[in-house]
């Protein structure tokens, strides 16, 4: 039986997922106000037009557009509405409430890794009333959707908790390398960072948490000096200053 999927948003993530769905044999009804539907897909004139006749709708536009997209298409939705946008758990719960008011099955789906190069195979985590239905529809088409019990918002929560770490780590590395470049020792620091990451294991997490609290006063002073150094090198110390302030708060709370 042919599956019909509506894809709202044909940007980097939505476009890649839509192409893979098409290649897997699904009928793809596509809508994006700024991007034309690729060949082979059914171009739609609006969210409601795209959703009409679809067993599953994937909203992959943006967090700020997710509520408007749902409201624009929900009247035509007779299948499952899955929101794949990176939105807060509160926004996902709001979406679920809007869907419930219209008796539309809803799932909060978190994309758990970068989509480029993976497309539909990108690991996803789904929660909410229709989480299992999303997995049942997408996984046979080549997707990798895991489900978790509980309401909409839980999948988004898991993704964003990871984001605090991964995106924060990336920002710290980028800032540190920029400063090292200005100091003339970028390769040295790059090698040092790579070595530390390669050595990391579960004990590293314990050491970071325990050490941060035990040595907050000294580390706050150290990061104050690092903040001054970056400013002297002509590098905006956004992460260094935030770390200094964070450590200072911990030191003052002990």
Image: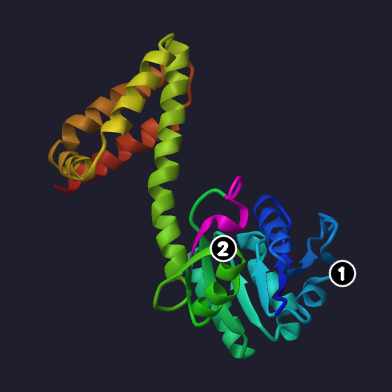
Instruction: Report the residue at 85% width, 57% height from top.
Output: 39
Q: Which mark is residue 143?
A: 2
In-image side of 56 versus 88 (left or right)? right
Q: Is residue 212 above or below residue 32?
A: above
* Tally of numbered discs: 2
Quadrant containing the N terminus in the rendered view: bottom right
Which of pointers 2 and 1 indicates the residue nearer the eye?
2
Q: Position of residue 228 (x, y in %)?
A: 36, 21
Segment colored magenta:
115-125
Mark earlier in primary sequence (2, 1): 1
In-image side of 70 versus 113 (left or right)? right
Can residue 237 be seen in this snapshot?
no
In-image side of 15 versus 251 (left or right)? right
Looking at the rendered structure, the secondary structure element under dot 1 is: loop
Count neighbours of disc 2 (C-alpha within 10 A) and say few if under 14, some if 14 to 19, many if 20 or more.
many
* Alpha carbon distance from label 2 to label 1: 27 Å
Q: Position of residue 89 (x, y in %)?
A: 47, 67
Instruction: Report the residue at 40% width, 61% height from top.
Output: 158
Instruction: Give yes or no for residue 157 being in the magenta stretch.
Output: no
Label 1 belongs to which residue?
45
């Amino acid at each position: 039986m042919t599956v019909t999927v509506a894809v709202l948003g044909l940007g980097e993530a939505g476009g890649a997922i839509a192409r893979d769905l098409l290649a897997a044999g699904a009928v793809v009804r596509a809508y994006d106000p700024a991007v034309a539907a690729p060949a082979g897909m059914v171009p739609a004139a609006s969210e409601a037009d795209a959703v009409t006749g679809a067993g599953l709708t994937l909203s992959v536009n943006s967090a700020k557009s997710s509520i408007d997209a749902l409201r624009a298409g929900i009247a035509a939705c007779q299948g499952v509405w899955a929101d794949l946008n990176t939105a807060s758990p509160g926004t996902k719960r709001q979406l679920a409430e809007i869907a419930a008011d219209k008796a539309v099955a809803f799932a909060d789906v978190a994309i758990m890794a970068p989509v480029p190069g993976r497309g539909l195979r990108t690991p996803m985590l789904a929660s909410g009333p229709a989480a299992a239905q999303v997995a049942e529809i997408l996984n046979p088409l080549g997707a990798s959707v895991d489900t978790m019990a509980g309401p909409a918002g839980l999948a988004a929560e898991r993704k964003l908790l990871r984001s605090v770490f991964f995106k924060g780590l990336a920002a710290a590395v980028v800032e540190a390398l920029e400063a090292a470049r200005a100091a003339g020792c970028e390769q040295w620091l790059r090698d040092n960072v790579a070595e530390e990451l390669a050595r990391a294991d579960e004990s590293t997490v314990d050491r970071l948490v325990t050490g941060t609290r035990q040595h907050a006063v000294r580390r706050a002073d150290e990061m104050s000096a690092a903040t001054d150094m970056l400013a002297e090198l002509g590098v905006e110390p956004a992460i260094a200053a935030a770390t200094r302030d964070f450590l200072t708060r911990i030191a003052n709370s002990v």
